Amino acid sequence: MPALVLLGAQWGDEGKGKATDLLGGSVDYVVRYQGGNNAGHTVVVGDQKYALHLLPSGILSPSCTPVIGNGVVVDPSVLLSELSGLNERGVDTSKLLISGNAHIITPYHVSMDKVAERFLGKRKIGTTGRGIGPTYADKINRVGIRVQDLYDESILTQKVEAALDVKNQMLTKLYNRRAIAADQVVEELLGYAEQLKPYVADTVLVLNQALEDDKVVLFEGGQGTLLDIDHGTYPFVTSSNPTAGGACTGAGVGPTKISRVIGILKAYTTRVGAGPFPTELFDEDGEALRRIGGERGVTTGRDRRCGWFDAVIARYATRVNGLTDFFLTKLDVLTGWEEIPVCVAYEIDGKRVEELPYSQSDFHHAKPIYETLPGWSEDITKAKSFSDLPKNAQNYVKALEEMSGAPISAIGVGPGRDETIEINSFL
Ligand code: GDP
Ligand code: IMO
Ligand code: MG
């Protein structure tokens, strides 16, 4: 059985954690391939709620092996506290595998992230402040620290010293901050080495052997398509590739192994942090979506910006990811609106534009062109099949499917595992 990718089709927080957890019981491996603890994935199992940041959502399924791939950036202190938090709640985390090639977020990356944002002032990106961008920058700049470096003190010391030689100049002379002592960073990192050792593995080999043995591998994206460093709303993006291709580079698995790419799509749109968002609402509808949808960040606690569904973005996600399916989430949140506007195209400089413009300047002043669909008032949270949905809810889903360019194979009608309507099986 080949591999599947599950990723965010919008600006993150689409419900990837719930969708991954749902499939977790039926797959052998769940792999995070990019991002780090900027992610906040919520999983609700019965009356228990889990907020996962770095660990793949498959960790809650006992039969599944969770994997942190080479493309992820790992903050060891966050990882260890996430593991101990789960252990205290009775979750077995012993099967976790971490790539020795994954890069480490050190305290100086976190400092650099925060001071850089402060320095940008009103031009800031609104990052999560977790050190993500600076860690990926060091990776590309070939001055990063990898998980495997924790097991060679001399190499680790040389690398930390080399990185801090430059960073301390920036921290003290440019940002007016105190320098960071290399020996303290080395000591802190070495303190994590033994605790992490049982998990460190050649994950590329493990995953490729698993695929040869017909095991099912699910790649779980962090963030979303529009936050992708190449395909998102640059520079208001994260510093990795949440799009489907990122699964190949971030886990070391060839594209020929991937048979299905599932886009998680919220029935409306949200965004955290700065950047363009054509369908953003500043009125009571936006406030109601935020309240009913519980749209508050899992990682930073920031209110999420809310707006109507944007079909231009959904079509774009279908294209850049080669989506085979959508998993539509949070349809229940739209219950109670008499009419629901859906953005079908943009107006840019007086012209109708059907596809996402490649020009940042154009996108910044794109105005949504709406079509209004009739709403429904019946409670849909108990719906188990498509036919259980009120006619207008069915029509809303069908309209979104038609506009978005890939079949909607599952619908979320509540946060719980069982609050899902399965239309086509993913496996
Ligand atoms: P992720 O980052 O993509 O995993 O998404 P988040 O966990 O940050 O945000 C999604 C939120 O919506 C979480 O609180 C989920 O529990 C919740 N959620 C997921 N699917 C549904 C759904 O179908 N209906 C409702 N009402 N909530 C959902
Ligand atoms: P999940 O996986 C929503 C946003 C930040 C900021 C930008 C860059 O839960 O969907 P970063 O710290 O990554 O350098 O911040 O990206 N961002 C997210 N927004 N969901 C996320 O993750 C996000 N991870 C980062 O708000 O705008
Ligand atoms: Mg989230």
Image (cartoon, grey):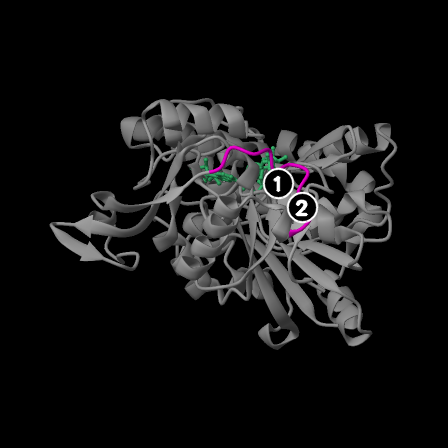
Mark 2 element type: strand
Along the line of sight, the residue nearer the viewer: 177 or 310: 310
Q: Could one spot residue 142 in this view of the protein?
A: no
Tell me where residue 335 appears, x and y as whole percent: 51, 34
Q: Amino acid at mark 1?
A: Val
Residue ID at (64%, 69%) = 253
Check mark 2 vs ligand 1: CB closer than 8 Å? yes or no: yes
Q: Which mark is residue 413?
A: 1
Q: Residue furthest left?
A: 350
Q: Is residue 129 magenta?
A: no
Tell me where residue 283 appears, x and y as whole percent: 32, 24
Check mark 1 vs ligand 1: CB closer than 8 Å? yes or no: yes
Quarter of the image for residue 28 reads bottom right
Mark 2 touches mark 1? (CB < 8 Å): yes
Residue ID at (76%, 58%) = 29
Along the line of sight, the residue nearer the viewer: 233 or 186: 233
Q: Is residue 378 magenta?
A: yes
Mark 1 element type: loop
How many numbered markers are drawn?
2
The dominant secondary structure in magenta is loop
- Span colored in magenta: 376-385
Q: Amino acid at mark 2?
A: Thr
Q: Could one spot residue 205 in this view of the protein?
A: yes
Give the left or right position of residue 185, taking residue 119 as reference: right
- Give above or below for 267 relative to 245: above
Please give the residue where the numbered disc 2 appears in the rendered image. 420
